[in-house]
Amino acid sequence: MLEVAAAADTVRALWPLRVTLLDPARPVVVTVDDDTARTGTTDSLTPGRAVPGGTYNWFVPTGTTAVMSGRWNDQVRLQLSRSAVAWVNAADVVPLPEGTPPPGGAVGSVRLTPESGSVVLRVPLPALVPYQVTEDEHSVTLRLYGVASDVNWMQYGGTDPLVRRMSYAQPAADELTITLELAPRVWGYRVRFDGRDLLLEIRRPPALDAEHPVRGRVVVLDPGHPPLGATGPTGLREPVATLAVALKAKTLLERAGAQVLLTRTDSFPMELFPRTRFAEQHGADVLVSIHANAFPDGVNPFTNNGTSVYYFQPRSADLARALDRALIAELGLRDLGMGRGDYALARPTWMPAALTEAAFIMIPEQEALLASEDGQWKYARGVAAGIEAFLRERAQQ
């Protein structure tokens, strides 16, 4: 019952609020699984947010265990450590049997193993605890939650030049960080569990030629949508336009010596994560997802249209900037700039990735641009030139 009083007036109403108190002496331990329906179309990562419904800060792999410390509607709060929490979708959480002990313990010595295309850090875990990976220009840091350090040895596994130095720290009683300082700039990484070990794989940058930067490189182009996608005033569908642009960009990049693969070559719907998986499985050096923009309700189309490019991982900012500059030069539209956005096709960690929104399909003139051969070639030249400029810049560093 909710009661509100003002002066001599009182109003009472039933409030459909259900409150349940969790007993801290009987912690609820859960495991994370983003594919409980077993569709096989997910990336096996559950996004974690600092606040319910907020932006993505963590990507929790299937099999991770944690203590559930709260729930708000369809969001569950995971207690990563004493001071850190992450909110995840309740549908991605499976309670473990009552009495399951909370995950935690000590992390022992770690080892680097050089491989032909990467260096792998193996971290023995007491349980599949939550983690977070962050990157800087020349470093990758792994933060493990709910654990303490017993790292006596940090074995480099030889004199491989990729990793200059390893270090660890205990910033909190139940948080451990391991930092790898790299000689080159970060190109990509990926993380997986191997039994109770965590493997952090650091990708070697490709050998680039500043004179011919795309020669021999694997470029994956993703024609955005279907399913869904925007539709222009005369009925031009976004998936049709993006495929036409991607095919033309493929031609241009192949002329420059690149190996170019498309995530789709027809109009059949394709979900998001099979696209990112395709890029990783084929060893893409660069991934670019090609789109045409649209407006939500309440946005003035005459002052907000133009070209924009989005990235998510820090290493991809230079790729987004190069694409934005090249697209503006080719198309001549208003520059809405580059930005960070948590789009699925911009989030891969194994390679630099960006998502382009070169024009607004809902603006008649820009729909006509996207529908024309000339406009499609301009968009394609912008994509190809942006990729080439990014790779050339990396080759010169």
Image (cartoon, rainbow, N blue to C red):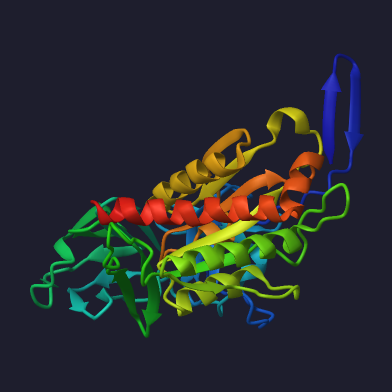
Residue nearest the viewer, comparing 124 with 105: 124
Q: Quadrant of residue 190?
A: bottom left
Q: Residue furthest bottom?
A: 195
Residue placed most toward the observer, 317 or 395 = 395
Residue 394, given in percent of the width and then of the height, sits at 30, 54
Residue at horizontal 69 percent and vertical 80 percent from the top: 37
Depth order, front residue of 331/58: 331
Asked whether residue 44 is in view, the answer is: no
Res. 211 image quadrant: bottom left
Q: Is residue 193 above or below residue 352?
A: below
Q: Is 26 positioned to the left or the right of 194 in the image?
A: right
Considering depth in this image, is 373 or 125 the residue closer to the camera? Answer: 373
**Which residue is at the far top?**
7
Where in the figure is residue 281, as x and y percent of width and height? 47, 79
Examine the rendered structure and indicate whether residue 44 appears above or below residue 308: below
* Total tally of numbered discs in the picture: 0
x 66%, y 75%: residue: 265
Placement of 377 over or under 337, stated as above or below: below
Residue in the image at 77% along x and 33% along y: 301
